[in-house]
Image (tube, helix red, strand yellow):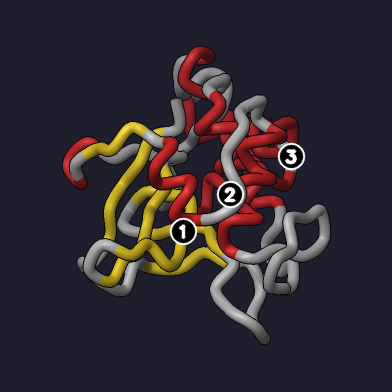
Amino acid sequence: MTALNRVPSLMARAGTASALTLAAVGGSVVAPGFASEAAAATPAYKALQVAASKKGSPYKWGATGPRRFDCSGLTLYSYKKAGKSLPRTAAQQYNKTRHISPGNRKAGDLVFFHSGSNVYHVGIYAGKGKIWHAPKTGDVVRLQKIWTKSVWYGRVK
């Protein structure tokens, strides 16, 4: 059986969140047999899966889930489900992460949007220049291309 023939059965076993994550990283298969089990078991990968599983959840300022989120509420919720704790706001989360360069970013890292030295938004890096995030009032959790160069990256410790 070729690797391509195994994809449908792997996706069926992987579930919705993994299928969404698969779509988020541009079709790279991140499932047993294709990625190392260790990489798939990392808190960052789990947090990315959780965020992807919340696709379509409404934005609500101050909300931390499980049905509604603001930007930092989504990252807090996703990492909590992955076994890691984060503070409440985007700025506090930035201060708690290990800061990394754009060239070292990986799926599951946090992406912080800033104006000068003020962090005002956060999402979870999905790969291929995209993030899962809760954008704003009237919107829903979704995958979106990073729209500015005014971003910093942080890795949850």
Circle 1: residue type: Val
Residue 30, image x, y percentages: 50, 32
Residue depicted at x 58% and y 78%: 136
Quarter holding residue 155: top left
Distance of mark 1 from mark 3, alpha carbons? 26 Å
Q: Nearer the viewer, mark 1 or mark 3?
A: 1
Q: Is residue 145 above or below residue 72?
A: below
Quadrant of the frame with the C terminus: top left
Q: Is residue 1 visible?
A: no
Residue 121, image x, y percentages: 45, 65
Which residue has dot 1 on it? 122
Q: Nearer the viewer, residue 87 or 123?
A: 87
Which residue has dot 3 on it? 15
Q: Earlier along the polypeptide chain: callout 1 or callout 3?
A: 3
Task: Please indicate whether residue 72 sits to the left or right of residue 122 in the image.
Answer: right
Label placed on residue 39: none
Q: Earlier along the polypeptide chain: callout 3 or callout 2?
A: 3
Q: Nearer the viewer, residue 85 or 19?
A: 85
Q: Are marks 2 and 1 in contact (CB under 8 Å)?
A: yes
Q: Earlier along the polypeptide chain: callout 2 or callout 1?
A: 2
Label placed on residue 75: 2
Using a 10 Å C-alpha cutoff, classify the residue at mark 3 as few (fewer than 14 neighbours), some (14 to 19) or many (20 or more): few
Circle 3: residue type: Gly
